[in-house]
Amino acid sequence: MTRFYKISSYLLLSLNILLVFFLLFEQYVTLPLWMSPLGRMHPLLLHLPIGFVVILVIFSFLKKEIDTKSFEFIRTLLMTLTALSAALTALMGFLLSREGGYDDSLLQFHKLSGVAVSFLAYVAVVFDDKIAVKPYSNWILLVAVVLTGHYGAGITHGENYLFEAVQENDKSPKFSENAPMYEVAIYPILEAKCVACHNDDKTKGQLNMSSIEKIMKGGKNGLIWKVGDALNSHIIQRANLPLEHKEHMPPKGKTQLTTDEIALLSAWISEGADVKKTFKNYLANSETKKIATKLIGSKTTEKEAKVYTFSMPSDADLAAVNTPFCSVFPLATGSPALQADFFVSKKFDRKVLENLSRVGEQLVILNLSKMPVKDEDLLLITKFTNLEKLILNQTDITGKSLEELKKCINLESIALAGTKISKDNIQKILDLPKLKEVFVWNTTINESALGELSKKYPKIKFEQGKIDNPNEILQLNPPILVNEDFIIKSNTPITLKHTLKNVKIRYTLDGTDPDSTTENIYDKPIIIDTYTKFKAIATKENWYASNKVEYSFFRSSFVPDSVYLINTPDPKYLGKGGTTLKDLKKGATDNFGDKEWLGYRDKEFVGIFEFKKSQLIKDLTISYLQKIDSYIMPPTVVEVWAGNNKNDLKRITKILPKQPNKMDGNANFGLQIPFKQASYKLVKLVIKPVSKLPAWHPGKGQKGWFFVDEVFFN
């Protein structure tokens, strides 16, 4: 052991000199790239000196239980290991700090305390027999390690990380429909998934996301979102990168954004990324509002904080009141309060409404929107004494018996939009003690009447919705495709429809984009019998044209008997092997992890398609995915070889597919390759992915992916 201690002594001296040098002259030091991985070992190594110091402290209590010689031997060994691990950990920390993105003041304290731990451990080892504080050295080291760890935790997780778990935290805002959508739905996602690495103390990529003002300053790559353009927004691009990609965010090992969270961020950005627009001001058909409501869940009812004193409904009663067209469910887990929603107006049954009396005490929300509810049915509703929210939008209510609802003394909100209710009718219930909001858009109650009611009942909020502007030009919804199968047989009709009358659906079949001047106007099903890239828009006089819809239809006349993959796909995207390419099942465009996709990146695709009998082949179509934000691109080269046995395969064509020149949308494309009509038993495809992404791409210079789900033969 003497030799070990001697070598350790020299090594400790060298390491501590190096640490002091870094501390004093760090700004003049340039480190080679290969040393970066060494710095990232710091989080792993730091547990060693901590563990050794704790063991030393515990071991000091055993001095009387162990003979002196053994005790000193073990103690010296532990001290030496503590000093070595502390020096190496501090050195790795210096290397890691070069990556930047940390609060300078906290980082400097952490560096100083880390070097101090290393130096104290070194002194304790080298001068163990000569210092008077030997009995207390373990405790001094423990205190130094705790302080160093505290500053390190502050850098990584935020200031006061050590004690914040035991402190009260009331920062999370309570949900309110009057609050901005950003505050109640968007920022909570960013706070949970992004702020840990982008805050006042740790600004990775020079980006601070601790407040909207700091977010809007952007980072080294600019703003994290582009208003109205989710596809080209930095935050969405990073989230959609493969998990293993070094620029994927959040980084691998951190809690990832869910599919719904990414969808919400995308929808919010596409709809304007307005940080001040309130939750309630988003239209009901807004994708942002739909997804946010799903994520927020029962918070949108604001009942989670309420305590109800009535009893829980029995399981038998709950089972009895639930039908295929009436859903009754608790507002929150463990809550006795219930909500009832009715569906499908043609299936409405008043007996089901009557039957709700079995849970009449617990019913707090009743949604009868679009049901054929009449004035006399209000008598049934008055039996629900704890009712707080009643939705009667687009029902047959006229208001002549509306005063019956005065029996519902707990009513806070009533929605009467789209009914024949009048100003005189509505006044019959406006003196309800707890009534807070009334929805009356699309009724006979005009702005003038609402102004009078608002003055008379200042505690009630009257919602009239969006006032139609006769001069406003609106955008049409896109055409609706009736077809459900995109793999066609001979002479398959494409059938379209639109919800509005007198709409002209203009379309193209050659891959070009349609516009308001496109001559092809849909008037009957369109017959196709080959691979077709179909695009369409809806147009109407005095309306803006709809957004474009596009679909790929693939023709399959026969399938190969066997498919052999010469090069296996990436291990993460193996699909179902060769069977994937001949099972006539399409992969999901929005999910390249679907088992119907094969993914290639580091290897080119090489596959052989075998027919037991020679087939006359006119063409083949390769169905591939384009998802540029996830580095999934069209192939750069496609070679087709054919023959009747493996020894006489000849290259019959070579294709260089057109490459995109901007961040286009996600789509399933087909590459149709004609044959000189001949019969073959074997067809071999060689398909090369993009070797270097173009300069305009966020991942420029890196390898692209190629994803394929089918190869069709005709």
Image (cartoon, rainbow, N blue to C red):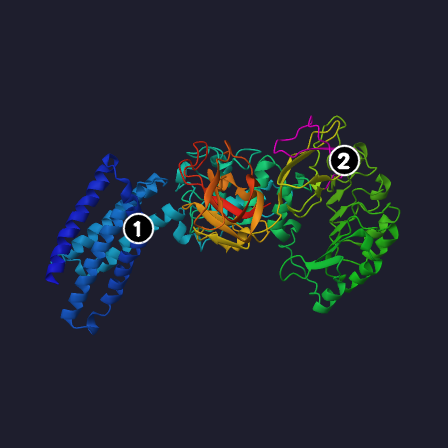
Q: Nearer the viewer, mark 1 or mark 2?
A: 2
| Label 1 element class | loop
Locate residue 658, reporting x and y percent.
51, 33
The disc placed on residue 523 is 2
Find residue 386 and report its image quarter: bottom right
Neighbour tally class for label 1: few under 14, some 14-19, many 20 plus, Cα within 10 Å: some
252 relative position to 126: left or right: right
Residue 337 falls in image quadrant: bottom right
Disc 1 to disc 2: CB gap under 8 Å: no
Mark 2 Cα-neighbour bin, 10 Å: few <14, some 14–19, many ≥20: few
Query: Which region shows up in magenta?
Result: 495-522
Instruction: Tell me which residue sits at (81%, 34%) in the image.
Output: 446
Instruction: Between residue 497 and residue 543, name the one nearer to us.
Output: 497
Q: Quadrant of the C terminus?
A: top right
Mark 1 residue type: Met
For the N terminus, the quadrant is bottom left
Q: Is residue 24 visible?
A: yes
Which of the two residues, 73 or 44, is positioned nearer the viewer here?
44
